[in-house]
């Protein structure tokens, strides 16, 4: 018996590397989608604050 380490098949390495790259791109895409959702929520919160301010100003002026 020899204790030589087995070298993995290069095609397996390429396949795994391709999977890792694809997974990284998918994670980046999900990150961008998450950023877009957060941006929409931030805009919605900003608009709600503006409406409350305008409402309180109109009540004060009446």
Image (spheres, rainbow, N blue to C red):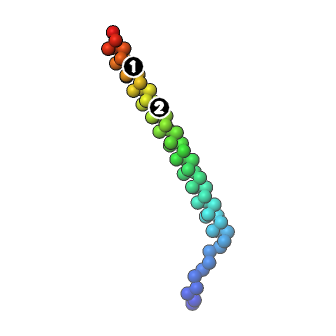
Dividing the image into 4 quarters, which one contains the N terminus? bottom right
Residue depicted at x 63% and y 60%: 18
Which marked residue is nearer to the observer: mark 2 or mark 1?
1
Asked whether disc 2 touches disc 1, contact meaning CB atoms under 8 Å apart, the reply is no
On the picture, is 5 further left or further right than 50?
right
Name the residue tied to disc 1.
54
Residue depicted at x 39% and y 26%: 49
> Secondary structure beneath disc 1?
helix
| Near-viewer residue (46 or 14) | 46
**Residue 5: which numbered mark, if any?**
none
Dividing the image into 4 quarters, which one contains the C terminus? top left
On the picture, is 26 further left or further right than 55?
right
**Residue 43: which numbered mark, if any?**
2
Residue 39 coordinates in the image, percent (x, y):
49, 37
Neighbour tally class for label 2: few under 14, some 14-19, many 20 plus, Cα within 10 Å:
few
Residue depicted at x 50% and y 42%: 35
In terms of image quadrants, where is residue 55? Answer: top left
Work out whether 62 lies above or below 51: above
Q: CA distance from mark 2 to mark 1?
A: 16 Å
Residue 52 coordinates in the image, percent (x, y):
37, 22
Q: Looking at the image, which residue sits at the far bottom?
A: 1
| Near-viewer residue (41 or 1) | 41
Q: Looking at the image, which residue sits at the far top?
A: 62
Neighbour tally class for label 1: few under 14, some 14-19, many 20 plus, Cα within 10 Å:
few
Residue depicted at x 57% and y 82%: 5
Residue 11 coordinates in the image, percent (x, y):
67, 69
Residue 42 coordinates in the image, percent (x, y):
45, 34
């Amino acid at each position: 018996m020899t204790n030589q380490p087995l070298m993995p098949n290069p095609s397996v390495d390429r396949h795994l590397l391709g999977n890792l790259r694809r997974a990284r791109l998918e994670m980046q895409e999900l990150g961008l989608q998450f950023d877009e959702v957060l941006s929409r929520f931030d805009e919605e919160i900003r608009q709600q604050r503006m409406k409350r301010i305008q409402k309180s100003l109109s009540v004060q002026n009446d």
